[in-house]
Amino acid sequence: MSDSPTLPTTLRGYERAARERLDQATAAYFFGAAGDGQTAQRNLSDLAEVQIFPRHLREIKGGGTRCTMLGQNLDAPIIVAPMAAQQLLHSQGETATAAAATAQGCGMVLSTQSNVPMENVRAEGPNARTFQLYWQGRDATLALAQRATDAGFQSLVLTVDAPVNGVRDEEIASGFQFPASLPFPNLAAQPPQFAPLTGTESAIFERIAYVMPTWDDVAWLCRHAPLPVLPKGIMHPGDVALEQDAGAAGLIVSNHGGRVLDGVPSSISALPAIRQTAGADFPVLFDGGIRRGVDIFRAIALGADAVLIGRPVLFGLAVGGALGVSHVLRLLRDELEITMALAGCRTLGDITRDCVRVPDGFIPY
């Protein structure tokens, strides 16, 4: 008799099972959103509004989903997004996720706020080749970048859209706190918890603003880091020239899954204008609202070279550890292949803007 857990058969089934397993506070942390959740919901609904034009009777023999991203060969344009504190969902945490991504030929961006040392994650999952940084000042950020280089990572993601925590109502109401025993071995201390402001002092404008990074800091990091740097959190085409001038190796279109600032556009609605501004050959990755393989197709059609997968990976980890994550990634790839076949696209290069229709006024810039 097999000791393997009984896994859901669909992606929606994973989400239901994960929500049933987790306590309210943990679910609020991982699956909640900023404010009223408008942006998080818009990430989903705007993707759903992108309609696919199927082209039939086309030759698709010999096709596939393989691609090369930042020098890494992938079996599909799928990369696990950087997500913190995964041992809250499974005892193996990020090592399970990295092993699953490697097994499925997908990439992975490891969070600075991993519960497992970056060196251990690399040993268990060689496809975890990108390391994510939050700005911690020039010296500390560069030191962490050097440690990532020594561990074998090949590129860096600098998250630029979350210099302060968003106001996440569900998380606050649930009283979520990281357990004191939860390790963060890539950091000198635990990440700061959200706390309401008290007194008359402005914590943002009188303290935090003085240590928040600027484009000058991004340019400095791109010059001095031993690895290529991709800013994550670009949502306005006006920022593309700034990050290209800073020397970035690519960018990630993202609104942090709607977890930081509510009321901003969906990631998918920002993608076409950013791709147009960035040019055809500049690496553009997409993050925000991917739930099905058909969503990956939509994002590629509107300009993404690859997509980052967030919450679905967490659903899989919570339900079945490495096996659950591996199954989720396989389901996403299978759905992408089916979508490509039914849309008449033999390769990823065949998925173009002409393959989809977007609503009037969809591109906001």
Image (cartoon, helix red, strand yellow):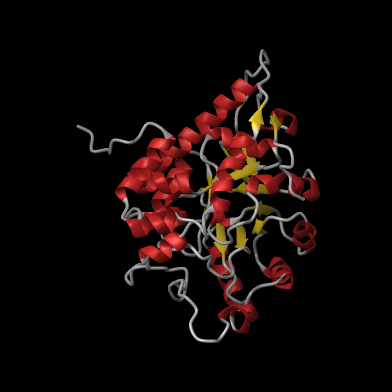
The answer to whether residue 305 is left or right of residue 18 is right
Q: Examine the rendering and report whether any part of residue 238 can be seen.
A: yes
Identify which residue, 315 or 3, lies in the foreground.
315
**Residue furthest top in the image:** 57
In the rendering, at what x and y percent does residue 177 appear?
Answer: 37, 68
In the rendering, at what x and y percent does residue 228 appear?
Answer: 67, 59
For the image, the number of numbered tags is 0
- Residue drawn at 57 percent across, 41 percent down: 45
Q: Is residue 140 above or below residue 82?
A: below
- Residue drawn at 67 percent across, 42 percent down: 305
Kindly indicate the quadrant of the structure image that contains residue 160. bottom right
Identify which residue, 288 or 44, lies in the foreground.
44
Q: Examine the rendering and report whether any part of residue 129 can be seen.
A: no
Indicate the quadrant containing the N terminus: top left, top right, bottom left or bottom right. Answer: top left
In the rendering, at what x and y percent does residue 14 appear?
Answer: 38, 40
In the rendering, at what x and y percent does residue 20 appear?
Answer: 31, 46
The answer to whether residue 210 is left or right of residue 332 is right
Q: Is residue 291 above or below residue 183?
A: above
- Residue drawn at 53 percent across, 51 percent down: 81
Identify which residue, 330 or 272, lies in the foreground.
272
